[in-house]
Amino acid sequence: MELDHELKGDVLVITPADTRIDAAVAIQFKDRMRELCSAAGSRIVLDLGQVDFVDSSGLGAIVAAMKQIGASARLELASLTPNVAKVFRLTRMDTVFSIHDDLDSALQPKAAHG
Amino acid sequence: MTIWTLPCSRKRRMDDLAVGSVAQKMTRLPEARLQLDVVATPLGVRRGLNEIRQTLHLWGMGHDDIGTAEMVLAEVMNNIVEHAYADCAGASMLLSAWQWHGGLAVHVVDSGLPMPDGKLPEGQAKPLNVDLTELPEGGFGWSLIRELTIDLNYCRSDGENHLRFRVPPSGLN
């Protein structure tokens, strides 16, 4: 599973190139996130703008990614497409993550406290 | 402890599995009903969902309702891969779906292990107001299925699991 990544200021922006985070790639996603996030700064934004489907395994992998980062950084989400937003809403995981409408708003300095 | 013998009657020959187009056959029946033989692997489920999405689009179902149906069917089929066929990789499940008042009626059959205690999991959502390290990484599947379906029914018959449910259109949710 390919995860594009770029440092924007002090924020590590990770963008999955695949359109799906599902049971077929959940473990790869989690492992790749661990590699990318190990040297990250204080904020990591996962830009899900290209992802149109997340199943419960994919959701579990995103939660696992946040847990393995631990207290060293925050994992925030941006650009949820409608179906993905629905999974987060139905599982109430939208109450656990900071979710930004788009990457621009995630990169605003004030967003760090959102 | 009971040792279950897996009835792998739906198990395929390995040479079938090697060829994706052979491993998954779909029939589009005239009365807007689809039947899909899905290989019980994560990639088999992904391919099955792709076929289903295209069919529901052809039936004129809206984007949101297709998304909801895909979400439910993904959870149902992944559960079969991970639990019913836990020791039986390469088996298959038969999914039938037909239009129902703008939504979808579904019947899924597999010949894997029965549901624990012969009944469907409650799918109780786990608490989220916990420490980061305690956040659940799984157990979302059945709560999603129960949230998005009606008339959910499970039975075990002749060594097969039968799951039936309806996915109402968004207007009725």
Image (cartoon, grey):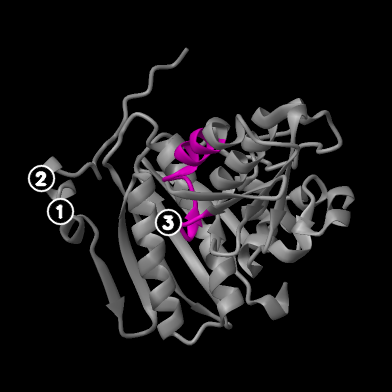
Looking at the rendered structure, which numbered label has been put on residue B91? Answer: none
Q: Position of residue B97 (x, y in %)?
A: 43, 69
| Separation (CA) of disc 2 from disc 1 | 7 Å
Residue closer to the observer: B50 or B81: B50
Q: Is residue B166 left or right of residue A73?
A: left
Q: Are marks 3 and 2 on the same chain?
A: yes
- Labels 2, 1: one chain: yes
Instruction: Using the image, determine if residue A32 lies above or below residue B37.
Output: above
Q: Callout 1: helix, strand or loop?
A: loop
Pair 3/2: label in front: 2
Dot 2 surroundings within 10 Å: few (below 14), some, or many (20 or more)? few
Classify 10 Å Cα crowding around label 3: few (below 14), some (14-19), many (20 and above). many
Q: Is residue A54 magenta?
A: no
Residue B138 visible? The answer is no
In this rendering, do the residues under marks 1 and 3 share a single chain?
A: yes
Toward the viewer: B8 or B128? Answer: B128
Residue A60 x, y percent position in the rendering: 61, 40
Q: Which residues are magenta?
A: A16-33
Query: Which residue is denoted by mark 3 in the rendering?
Result: B108
C-alpha span from label 3 to label 2:
25 Å
Chain at tag 2: B
Q: Which residue is mark 2?
A: B15
The reply to whether discs 1 and 3 touch (Cβ–Cβ < 8 Å) is no
Q: Amino acid at mark 3?
A: Val
Label 1 belongs to which residue? B19
- Residue extending furthest toward the front: A9
Chain letter of disc 1?
B
Asked if residue B148 is positioned above or below residue B42 in the image, the reply reads: below
Asked if residue B81 lies left or right of residue B23, the reply is right
